Image: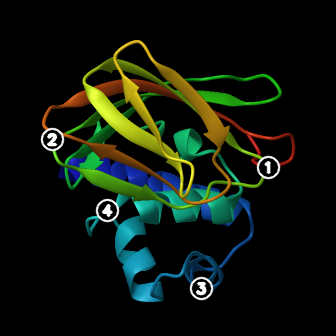
Amino acid sequence: MDHLALATLGQHLQRLRQEKGLSLSQLASAAGLAKSNLSRLEQGNGNPTLDTIWRLAVQLEVPFGTLVAPIGEPLGEDGVQVRLIDQGRETPQVDAYWMRCAPHTTRLAEAHTPGARESLTVISGRLEAGPEGEITRLQAGDSLAFPADRPHRYRTGEHWATLLMTIVYAEGGAAP
């Protein structure tokens, strides 16, 4: 993430935290982060992982897309890139993402907010995805929906995989 994107994320994160009436210490503790790391993020420094951003969104009770909406570039780490395409404004809230995974990549995703469901449609390539213990093999044109409120993973083989991902938040599971 470039400096401008980090600064934008930091300002937005701070505003959301303050709107919720949370101190740096409260949010950092709830998200499993050091207070100094959260402070650096809010100042536009650091290099947050996707999981860190997810944990912050869950603790702020906002969809991941709400936290990253001001950032115009894909977020990525360890062979995975994610970009918010659009956010629904109705109930239930639905966020749509473009996601790309490099060859031989495994991405372990933490549980999302309670009641959240994830749907994947593979555009190109192949991958295995789903909740731990319920992994499904997918190829171009295949779709999969599963409960995202428990840990899940994505794993590619020899080629890149590109997919569309939607997350449907349960009513009350995330505040728009």
The answer to whether 24 is drawn above or below residue 5 in the figure is: below
* Residue 157 locus on image (x, y percent): 20, 40
Q: Pointer 3: residues within 10 angstroms few (<14), some, or many (20+)? A: some
Q: CA distance from mark 4 to mark 3?
A: 20 Å
Q: Which residue is mark 4?
A: 44
Residue lying at 17% horizontally and 48% vertically, measured from the top left: 104
Tag 1 or tag 3, which sits nearer the N-term? 3
Please state which of residues 20 and 99 is positioned toward the viewer in this rendering. 99
Discs 1/2, front: 2
Q: Is residue 58 left or right of residue 74?
A: right
Return the disc, 4 or 2, that comes first in the chain's sequence. 4
**Residue 29, disc:** 3
Specify the label residue 103 is tagged with: 2
Residue type marked 3:
Ser
Residue that numbered label 1 is attached to: 173
Q: Can I make out residue 108 in this image?
A: yes
- Residue 6: x %, y % from top left: 30, 54
Point out the tag, 4 or 1, that comes first from the N-terminus. Answer: 4
Tell me the residue at 51%/21% (across/down).
Answer: 143
Q: In the image, which is nearer the foreground, mark 4 or mark 1? A: 1
Amino acid type, residue under disc 4 in the picture: Gly
Asked whether the viewer can see residue 73, the reply is no
Sequence-wise first label, 2 or 3: 3
Q: Is residue 2 left or right of residue 133?
A: left
